Image (cartoon, coloured by chain):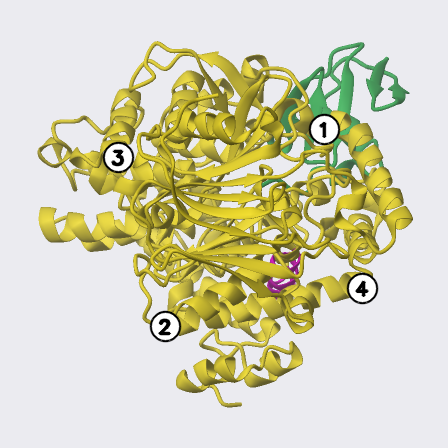
Chain colours: A yellow, B green
Amino acid sequence: MVELNTKEIKTTTYKRPEIERGYANQTLCIDLSRQDISIKPVSEKMKEVFVGGKGFDLWLLWNAVRGKTKWNDPENAICIASGPLGGTPTFPGSGKSIVTTISPTTGSVMDSNVGGYFGPYLKFSGFDALEVVGKGLGDTVILIDGIEQKIQILEIPGLPDDSYSLSAVLTDFFADGKKQDISVVSTGPGARHTLIGCLNFTWYDVKRKRVRYKQAGRGGIGTVFADKGIKAIVARWDSSVTLDTNHPADKEALKAVSKAYSREIRELDPKQNEMARIGTTHLVPIMNDFDLLPTHNFRYGQHPGANNIGREVYQHLFDPGFDGCWKGCAVACAHGVKDFVPMTGPYKGQKVFVDGPEYETIAGCGSNIGVFDPFTILEMNFYCDAYGLDTISVGTSIAFAMECFELGLITKEHTGGMDLSFGNRLSALELLHQMARGEGFGAIVGQGVRRMKEIFEKEYGADPNVMNDIGMESKGLEFSEYMTKESLAQQGGYGLALKGPQHDEAWLIFLDMVHNYMPTFEQKAEALHWFPMFRTWFGLCGLCKLPWNDIVPEDNKETPEPAKVMKHVQWYADYFRAVTGRNVTPDDLIRMSEAVYNFQRIFNLRMGYGRREHDSVPYRAMGPVTVEEYESRQDRYDKQLVEKYGVDITGKETAEKLAILRKFREEQYERLKDAVYERRGWTKDGIPTLKTVKRLGIDFPEVLEVLRANGVES
Amino acid sequence: MIKVGDEQVPWYEGMTIASLLAEREDGHTYAVVRLNGRLISRPKFESTLIPDNAEVILIPMVAGG
């Protein structure tokens, strides 16, 4: 075991409650400023309205902050929860944690979901959710020890700075000989020096004898963590989790539905996307073929080099094995590369294990910055994780800086002499190392796209109109990695997402553009109601969404609504009933989510956002910004102008056609907002009506007060 | 012969993914197939020839992300 110099700041012992039907029925609050540890009960009303997971997080966060709270105020909370179904070891995808906070990049509510063992271990240790407020001194480690039934706030100076080594050291230190009992949440120096920090959530890979991790990446939650002076949060729980650990209401029913689902995945995944073998890398060639893989800051959706960075290559690089990020998950998509040797940075020349890459990292740190070298992507992936940086925001931010460089909006004078042309992989890696050190131009890129736009305009005199068109952020969050120009539904999926443009709320691009499941406006609006609601439900329960529709029943195509994969939705309803004892139908699952979803929208409103104006997206997300982009797909755009909009394009220059197309597409997006708001029961300004909040049972006085303050009284 | 999932299907010269799917009632529902282990997407269905003795897996892809 490693030797560490620990200083005990506060220790509390507690009696661990039995888990009842998936709930511990209490939450844990740690105030680092006051060095206080407290336990709060969970009421039946809280379970009924907020369900668990993200719902509990949001309720705790709502009560911790005020409308004026900034991300780095002590009262800002980081909330982490599993959910009532979380920790079930046989039902696929049941190990997710959901994290919320007030984000440094959006100024509003951020949520991010992540694998690893922390959420289930937290719950089985006796807490449905954890809330951390206040600020520590910089070396703070929080220990939640469900085996010894004690909570500790510790100071441990001299720990490694990066998450890769830190996770391993703390796992070793707290394991008491059984490393699989430990899960560590930590971040790294990149989170401290930028606004786009992520959190790493670990589990111990017994077969490989090493700590592995997954990331809660979006919206700078790692930055809040670092700002609170937290080095790590460690959960310790007996790893021998069984179906009984959640004390389900109906164990036989749980066993039956878990078995059926696992069997189906084991049988069908090899015939479908092979996620147990190649993760999500299959998406790279598919997205590329459909012109949906972002390249060069979302200018184009296709590149000949894409063949070098997809499934065909990574299937040979991944270390073979069955890689679930929670026990017994049959999807098992958490692959990694062993004995990778970085060519730069503090691990240069050393063999390391890289957790990933997944599709988003490949597209963000690869194609979108013009890099089509699988090893550079691995190195970016490794350092982003070790430094505690979100691969998506890093990729999209560097892509923006590179386009600005190529357009001459910034020059070598601003970049510290670096050539930031697309494809310059050494510059991309150097930016990453600078982010970790908080130095040079990397420190500016690490502020994210929204702040870069401000800095480039104010300090370098760059054209704000061009940057607003090409800067791929909405609400202050960088876009995740799908091209949306030809899918109005996915434009809405990004623009109307509560936290900003992340695909976990509504991934409709394939359903809309490829399968044409939602040709009419009304169908798109309906999809932008149903899909975000159902995806929200996974976050309430501690689940991963991948099993739902990445592996589909063979007869799914013959069902009335193949996009919804209703056989699986029914299984989720059965699963919820088996654990919690609450009888629910698929429609009830949507209603549960609606309550939390609308509450989050009102939370945004309370923080000064959450209106129509905040649901806008840059024009690059809707269509071609430049003549070059238009002409690269001229047949497509010309055809649309003639056939869809009835425009006579005879004799028109590209610039004129570009402007006409833009007008139509921007109008279309605004019409989509109207349709979606109406379907969701919101005003034309995008605010839930009184009738909606009453129907959903979230008409608490404090909610009504926010609505009243924003002019909604009917 | 080629193998399509668990079925044996007669092969012919010039057979493409598009022509194979055109002969199937549910052919329009597939946007991606795996041909001898390689992913082929709809934009390439017309131009992708299927060799004799090939194994084709039809992927009912509705999601991702």
Q: Is residue A96 magenta?
A: no
Q: Nearer the viewer, mark 2 or mark 1?
A: 2
Disc 3 designates what residue? A435
Q: Amino acid at mark 2?
A: Gly
Residue A487, above or below B26: below
Q: Nearer the viewer, residue A389 or A240?
A: A240
How many C-alpha atoms fall within 10 Å of the one at disc 2: few (<14), some, or many (≥20)? some
Q: Are marks 2 and 3 on the same chain?
A: yes
Q: Earlier in the sequence, mark 3 or mark 4?
A: 3
For the residues marked 1 and 3, what is the alpha-carbon distance in whole angstroms? 48 Å
Is residue A656 something that shows in the picture? yes
How many C-alpha atoms fall within 10 Å of the one at disc 3: few (<14), some, or many (≥20)? many
Label disc, if present, on residue A582 of the rendered structure: 4
Is residue A96 something that shows in the picture? no
Label disc, if present, on residue B18 of the rendered structure: 1
Q: Amino acid at mark 3?
A: Met
The magenta segment is A520-534
Image spot of residue A243 (x, y percent) = 80, 42
